[in-house]
Image (spheres, helix red, strand yellow):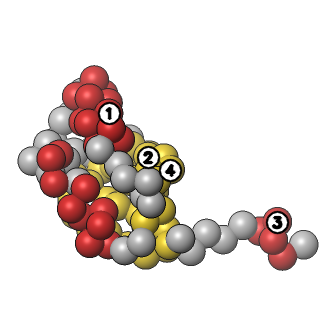
Amino acid sequence: MARYFVIHRTPIEGDQDALVAAARRVKASLPGEVEWLNSWWLAGDENKLFCEWEAPDRDTIWALLGPVKALLPVESIHLVTRLDPAWYE
């Protein structure tokens, strides 16, 4: 399955409770072929959230994020490949 990073702008400055509530709504709506792996909230002035997903394609992720796009606007979705230095030892 392909992996993607979704980058959100988070207008919710420091409000983790609102982010967690939005995350729970998305997680509850996920079909079996999609997995939200983790998220990283960029500390500091930028207020960005980086979310790692496994999904068949970008369009699937885009559609699943529909209910929370107003709260967590999607800046971009990137196809990524995991690179682990241990693989090359």
Q: Of discs 3 and 4, which sits in the foreground?
A: 4
The image position of residue 13, as x and y in percent, is 21, 34
Where, by quadrant of the figure, is residue 17 drawn?
top left
Residue picked out by circle 3: 86
Q: Secondary structure beneath disc 1?
A: helix
Residue 78 in view in this figure: yes
Q: Say left or right for 84 vs 58.
A: right
Q: Of marks 1 and 2, which one's residue comes earlier in the chain?
A: 1
Where, by quadrant of the figure, is residue 16 drawn?
top left
Residue picked out by circle 2: 39
- Kindly identify which numbered label has been placed on residue 24: 1
Distance between the Cα atoms at labels 1 and 2? 13 Å
Task: Give amino acid for label 3.
Answer: Ala
Q: Of discs 1 and 2, which sits in the foreground?
A: 1
Residue picked out by circle 4: 37
Distance between the Cα atoms at labels 1 and 3? 33 Å
Residue 11's place in the image compared with 85, above or below, is above
Distance between the Cα atoms at labels 3 and 4? 20 Å
Mark 1 is surrounded, within 10 Å at the Cα level, by few (under 14), some (14 to 19) or many (20 or more) other residues, namely few
Q: Of marks 3 and 2, which one's residue comes earlier in the chain?
A: 2
